[in-house]
Image: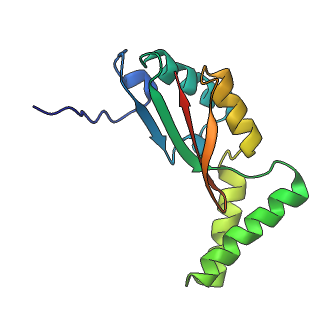
Amino acid sequence: MSRVELIEGTIDDAPVGPFDAATCLLTLHFLSAPERLRTVRAVHDRLRPGAPFVVAHGCLPREGVERSLWLDRYAAYAVASGTDPEQARTMRTTVEASVNMLSPEEDEAILRDGGFRDARMFFAALNWHGWVGHA
């Protein structure tokens, strides 16, 4: 008997639960802040009290100079890892224009506002961050 069922879709496609845990990996940075909060609240509502929620996704400072610096680091890391410099510049431009990366502080606030009062960052590497909170 399987204990795990993969459900492809959005939070609205997930059963109401209650569930013992949840993860959301490399997804939330595609959602606007209001949609991200709605999603986090919907996950919280599907979890048993005390159940862990682990999230990991990209985030960047919101201020212009700091944000630009982090995007430059993102591109430089790609080049250092073997990516063609022109492709790295294109990647940087695409991320800047089309991904809804919030600051780490804003992301943590969304988790708290979504019901995960004890949300804490447990991972950070360049622009990737991970948090865990409990319902």
Residue at figure coordinates x 59%, y 84% from the top left? 84
Query: Which residue is most to the left?
Result: 1
Q: Is residue 128 visible?
A: yes
Q: Position of residue 122 (x, y in %)?
A: 59, 47
Relative side of 22 to 107, left or right: left
Q: Position of residue 105 (x, y in %)?
A: 76, 40
Residue at figure coordinates x 43%, y 19% from the top left? 47
Q: Is residue 89 visible?
A: no
To which quarter of the image does residue 85 belong?
A: bottom right
Residue at figure coordinates x 48%, y 24% from the top left? 43
Relative side of 78 to 50, left or right: right
Q: What colouring method underlies this structural image?
A: rainbow
Give 104 or 26, whichever is nearer the viewer.
104
- Asked if residue 86 is positioned above or below residue 68 in the image, the reply reads below
Relative side of 99 to 11, left or right: right
Give 123 or 92, whichever is nearer the viewer.
123
Q: Position of residue 104 (x, y in %)?
A: 72, 45
Residue at figure coordinates x 65%, y 81% from the top left? 86
Give 19 or 6, whichever is nearer the viewer.
19
- Asked if residue 113 is positioned above or below residue 87 in the image, the reply reads above
To which quarter of the image does residue 71 belong?
A: bottom right
Number of marks: 0
Quadrant in which the N terminus is drawn? top left
Q: Position of residue 110 (x, y in %)?
A: 68, 29
